[in-house]
Image (tube, coloured by chain):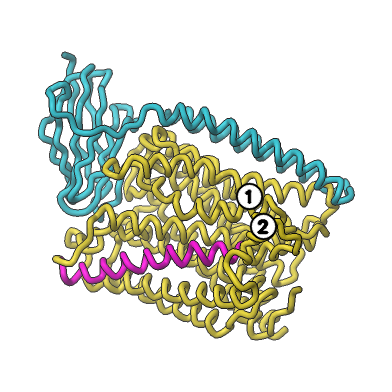
Amino acid sequence: MTTTISKGARQSVVAYAATAAAVLLLLMVFGLLMRASQAGGLALPADLFYQVMTAHGIGMVGIAGMCGAAIMWYFLGHYVDLSTKIFVLNLILFLVGVVMILSAIFIGGFAGAWTFLYPLPAKSGGVWEAGAAALHLSGVLLIGVGFLLFHLDTGRAILSKYGSIGRALGWPQLFGGSTEEAPPPTVVASTMVLIVNVLGLLSGASILAISLVNLFVPEFGIDPLLGKNMIFFFGHVFINATIYMSVIAIYEILPKYTGRPWKANKPFLAAWTCSTLFVVIVYPHHLLMDFAMPTWMLVMGQVISYLSGIPVLVVTAFGVLSYTHRSGLKWDMAPSLLFLAAFGWAAGAIPAIVDGTIVVNLVLHNTQWVPGHFHTYLLMGLVPMVMAFMYYLAGNAGTGLDRGAFWAFLVGGFGFTFTFLWAGKESVPRRFAEHLPEWMGIDALGAVFAALAILGVVVFAVRFLGRVGHLVKA
Amino acid sequence: MQEIAWSVTLWLVLVLAAAFIYVVMKSGDKAEAAVVQGAAGKIRSVLFWVLLVAGVPVTMVTLADLPYAAATTEGESQVVDAVGSQWSWALSQSSVVSGRPVEFRVTAADASHGFAIYNSSMTLLAQTQAMPEYTNVLRYTFAEPGTYKVLCLEYCGVDHHNMMTEFTVVAP
């Protein structure tokens, strides 16, 4: 049984969405600046380029998390009793953290990338002071604390309603032959995210705390390879969780247009249980070029990368196709964006899985192939899920302008991501402030496509922000 | 290898796109959900088994020859010690012979770096991470004499993009 959420809760969700629209746009412009600079059309000094890169990276990870949190919280609140105060506290901690991070970067000169790869924050080569690194890491830690509280609250609410994690994941129906109706897809997805993100956040908070102490007490350190494992476990889990939270928009909104409720059947439950395990143990595929890692972990990274594609393709992407096929749905903006998002997520998984192959990773790791695949499933997967949620919240079916923006976003977005993949094929390194002349043609093309995609998002964002006042009062 | 990765990606994305476009084209032709879902369930089962079965040989073939090698103790390889530090590479020798394995023993003095070998066409041939406290062993046999570059592929600070060096490969 579902309930409606309160006015205060709805206003909080609108606040999240409005923040997301503004921050996403700003950070997309940062991304465009980097591509334009690599193309030679805009000469960003190297120190500024890497500051912008750091802000773009950590900002996108954080705001993707906030987008996912807003979608998950809004729909989960229809099934369980969530705390609006904790939800708002997460937003406040996020905003304070953002101010700390931006100050550390653009005033303190911190440019350690969003990965803050230990021991880089303490080894700036004289470019930034320990205080700037400490401010940055503290800001990230504060945002992590907010998310931890957020997930603990969803865990409390889910457990009080369903009694156990296993029941919330539908294990009695999956393994026990229970004929009771399984929990709704939103509850199953939220429970999966609860499990993986609490683990990821604890790992991230631990390495952040160690890195912070290391800044001022260099003797207090950690094995660099262990530190790297902790960072990539956190980073991998957190960014994947942003999509697993956002995909709830597909499960909840699309059926309102197709008239076919999304059921948590056995394949669905099996897929989410598998994904819970896969997301936790697949992270070594980020460390395939760390030859000192135990070989079995790296082989596991490849094998689980392959297996991870099955739930994405066979359950969610195929589910979108089967629920949409011959449904007679009207292609308003929300279902259009959700359909695009399902394709973007599945399409992005393909080059990611290819890169998860050890012998391929040997020549693609840390080339532009990597931003190619993750921009495909984030820019063309997560972002349209979020934009669809905004159109849904605003009750905006869309006009000719919105549809024009949709096509600009589609063409620009895929053009942008495929120029990254193309550059990766050409061995162009990622995270280079300056490019060789032979790489600049692809960079320029990428910048043009990026500008087109941003144009689309400007329309999406402005259309939503223009209705915020109405939504708050409603 | 890069061309294979590119072709596989393009073809699979195109197949996926074709499925999505087909469904869009048919979306207005309304049918009972039970009819569509029944057929979809069968297709889903086939898709699941096709992916699983196809994945087995692909996994076996790609895992057959891994780049991970232990350091050798005998003189069959040419050994090059490589140390990365912000923002330069120190190689123990700047010339090796083609046709014989070269064993790069790679580490770092400060932060993490990425040791990547590029040929004269700026195509990435092989790489490994350079990390403090660890030595990663990368074995590679150069087929062609010439000048090769080492680039840093792990972001390491403000002059990361200029962290390059060269070595030569000569005929035996």
Q: Is residue A265 left or right of residue B83?
A: right
Whether residue A198 appears in magenta in the rendering, the answer is yes
Give the residue drawn at x 29%, y 28%. Answer: B119
Within 10 Å of disc 2 (Cα), the crowding (few <14, some 14-19, many 20+) is: few
Magenta range is A189-218
In three-dimensional space, the C-alpha distance between marks 2 and 1, rounded to whole angstroms, equals 44 Å
Q: Colour of chain A?
A: yellow
Tell me which chain the residue with mark 2 is part of: A
Residue at 36% across / 42% down in the picture? A288
A56 is higher (above) or lower (below) than A86: above
Q: Earlier in the sequence, mark 2 or mark 1?
A: 2
Residue A56 in picture, x, y percent from top left: 42, 61
Mark 2 lies on residue: A176
Write the residue at 53% across / 67% down.
A194
Residue at far left of view: B92
Q: Is residue B67 visible?
A: yes
> Going by the image, does A250 lie left or right of A54?
right
Which chain contains the residue that carries disc 1?
Answer: A
Q: Which mark is residue B9?
A: none
**Frontmost residue, B172 versus A394:** B172
**Residue that label 1 marks:** A410
Residue A109 image point, x, y percent: 27, 67
Q: Is residue B81 above or below residue A142?
A: above
Please, is residue B11 above or below residue A172 in the view?
above
Residue kind at label 1, given as amino acid type: Leu
Instruction: Give the colour of chain B.
Output: cyan
